[in-house]
C-alpha cells in the first residue's frame, strides 16, 4: 500500500518570499505523484504531477516540484509567493498500474502574509 | 474547467433525517469517488466506483451508502443523519489510468444538529 506524509500542517510565509512544502511517500511499487490545491470553499484542483522522465515538473503559476526517488520525496516549491497562493495544498500518490484510488496526505495550509 | 457538480452546496439538517448528496459529471468518466474532509482539512476516501453497478468501500468506515446506476451520477445517502456526520463531502471523477487527473466537485458542507 502507498502512504503520503506532509511534514508541515501549516506554513506561514511573507509575500514575495520563497516557500517549500514538503511531501514524502512510501510505496513498494513505482508510483505517480501529484500536488493538488484547494482554495477556500472550493474543491481540489490539480497543480502538477510527476509521471516519468524529467524529475522536475512545473505548474503554470510558478510552482515546481522535484521527484527524488532515493529520498522518496516530492517537495513543492515556489521562489516568490503571492497573497493569492494562500490555500491548502495536498500531496497525493498512486501506484502506476491498476485502478487504485489516489492516496492523499493530510494537507499543508499555506498562509501568505502581506 | 471541471464539469463535476455537487448539490446541495450547504445543508443543515436535524438528527435522524435521511439525506442524499448528489454528484454528477458530464465528462463520461468511469471512475468516481467520495471523500469526507475533516475540519482540519484531511481527506478520507469513503466510497468509490469503477463504473456502472460497481461500488467499493474506502479506507474510512462510513455509515453512508452509494449507488452507480448511470455513468454520470454517483449519489451518496445517509439513512439517518447524526451530528458525527457533520463534515464536508467531496465528489471526484477520473477516466483511464492512474496517471490521469482526478477532477473534484465544489463539495457539500453538511451540518447535522
Image: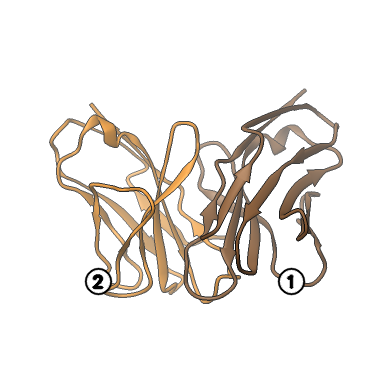
Residue ID for mark 1: A52
Chain of the residue that carries numbered disc 2 in the rendered image: B
Chain of the residue that carries numbered disc 1 in the rendered image: A
Q: Check residue B61 in the rendering and tell me which mark sits there, or answer none.
A: none
Residue appearing at x 68%, y 46% in the figure: A23
Q: Is residue B3 left or right of residue A28?
A: left
Badges 2 and 1: C-beta atoms under 8 Å apart?
Answer: no
Outermost residue on the top side: it is: A114
Near-viewer residue (A16 or A30): A30
Near-viewer residue (A36 or A5): A5
Whole-percent x, y for residue B110 in the image = 32, 37
Tell me, what colour scheme is on the image? Answer: by chain
Task: Please tell me whether residue B23 is drawn above or below residue A24 in the rendered image.
Answer: below
Q: Is residue B21 left or right of residue A97?
A: left
Whole-percent x, y for residue B14 in the image = 18, 30
Chain with colour orange in the figure? B
Residue ID for mark 2: B69
Chain with colour brown in the figure? A
Task: Please tell me whether residue A56 is drawn above or below residue B36 in the rendered image.
Answer: below
- Give the secondary structure at mark 2: loop
Task: Please tell me whether residue B85 is drawn above or below residue B19 in the rendered image.
Answer: above
Q: Is residue B27 left or right of residue B99?
A: left
Task: Please tell me whether residue B75 is drawn above or below residue B13 in the rendered image.
Answer: below
Local crowd size for mark 1, using a 10 Å CA cut-off: few (<14), some (14–19), many (≥20): few
Whole-percent x, y for residue A87 in the image = 63, 37
| Mark 2 or 1: the one toward you | 1
Q: Is residue A32 left or right of residue A3?
A: right
The Cα–Cα distance between marks 2 and 1, rounded to whole angstroms, is: 36 Å
Residue appearing at x 24%, y 50% in the figure: B64
Amino acid at each position: 500500500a502507498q502512504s503520503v506524509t506532509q511534514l508541515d500542517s501549516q506554513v506561514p510565509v511573507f509575500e514575495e518570499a520563497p516557500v517549500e512544502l514538503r511531501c514524502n511517500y512510501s510505496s513498494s511499487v513505482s508510483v505517480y505523484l501529484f500536488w493538488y490545491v484547494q482554495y477556500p470553499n472550493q474543491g481540489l484542483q490539480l497543480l502538477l504531477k510527476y509521471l516519468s522522465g524529467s524529475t522536475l515538473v512545473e505548474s503554470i503559476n510558478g510552482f515546481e516540484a522535484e521527484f527524488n526517488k532515493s529520498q522518496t520525496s516530492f517537495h513543492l516549491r515556489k521562489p516568490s509567493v503571492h497573497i493569492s497562493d494562500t490555500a491548502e495544498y495536498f500531496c497525493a500518490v498512486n501506484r502506476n498500474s491498476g485502478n487504485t484510488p489516489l492516496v492523499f496526505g493530510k494537507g499543508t495550509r499555506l498562509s501568505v502574509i502581506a | 474547467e471541471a464539469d463535476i457538480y455537487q448539490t446541495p452546496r450547504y445543508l443543515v439538517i436535524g438528527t435522524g433525517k435521511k439525506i442524499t448528496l448528489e454528484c454528477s459529471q458530464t465528462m463520461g468518466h468511469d471512475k468516481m469517488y467520495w471523500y469526507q474532509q475533516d475540519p482540519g482539512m484531511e481527506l478520507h476516501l469513503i466510497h468509490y466506483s469503477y463504473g456502472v453497478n460497481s461500488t467499493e468501500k474506502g479506507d474510512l468506515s462510513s455509515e453512508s451508502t452509494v449507488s452507480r446506476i448511470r455513468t454520470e451520477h454517483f449519489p451518496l445517502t445517509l439513512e439517518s443523519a447524526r451530528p458525527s456526520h457533520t463534515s464536508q463531502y467531496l465528489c471526484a471523477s477520473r477516466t483511464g489510468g492512474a496517471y490521469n487527473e482526478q477532477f473534484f466537485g465544489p463539495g457539500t458542507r453538511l451540518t447535522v444538529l
